[in-house]
Image (spheres, grey):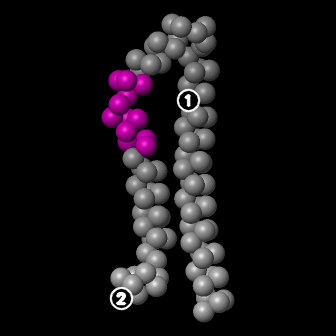
């Protein structure tokens, strides 16, 4: 009943659910759109003198970087809501 009056937030479980949804959706979307990724890879290989292994390495590093940023964004939001609850507990 407290979440109906906004005395307590449901944000942390919802944020965790959205994190896992996105963490699973990003690789799934790349797998579904792999023909587009292959086309872009072919264009990059023809345009720039780069080897396939270097392109794959850059893609993997970019993918890991995006996943880390995705995680950090949710950690920041969850930390904010935890600080708010803690401060509300101290004051109230």
Residue range (magenta)? 26-37
* Circle 2 crowding by C-alpha within 10 Å: few under 14, some 14–19, many from 20: few
Give the mark nearest the N terminus, 1 or 2: 2
Instruction: Report the Cα–Cα distance between label 1 and label 2.
Output: 47 Å
If the image is split into quadrants, where does the N terminus sit? bottom left
Image coords of residue 7 (percent x, y): 46, 85
The residue that label 1 is drawn on is 59
Left or right, residue 78 beside residue 7: right
The residue that label 2 is drawn on is 1
Please tell me which residue is depicted at 63% across the width and 82% down the height of the picture.
Answer: 86
Image coords of residue 37 (percent x, y): 42, 25
Quadrant hosting residue 55: top right
Magenta span: helix, strand or loop, mainly?
helix
Image coords of residue 9 (percent x, y): 46, 77
Which numbered disc covers residue 6? none
Q: Is residue 71 above or below residue 45?
A: below
If the image is split into quadrants, where does the C terminus sit? bottom right
* Circle 1 crowding by C-alpha within 10 Å: few under 14, some 14–19, many from 20: few
Please tell me which residue is depicted at 42% across the width and 59% down the height of the picture.
Answer: 18
Q: In this view, does 78 lie above or below 73?
A: below
């Amino acid at each position: 009943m407290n979440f109906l009056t906004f005395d307590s937030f449901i944000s942390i479980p919802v944020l965790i659910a959205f994190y896992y949804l996105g963490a699973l959706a990003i690789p799934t979307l790349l797998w579904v759109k792999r023909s587009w990724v292959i086309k872009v890879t072919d264009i990059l290989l023809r345009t720039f003198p780069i080897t396939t292994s270097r392109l794959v390495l850059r893609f993997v590093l970019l993918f890991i970087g995006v996943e880390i940023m995705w995680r950090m964004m949710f950690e920041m939001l969850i930390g904010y809501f935890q600080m708010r609850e803690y401060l509300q507990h101290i004051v109230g």
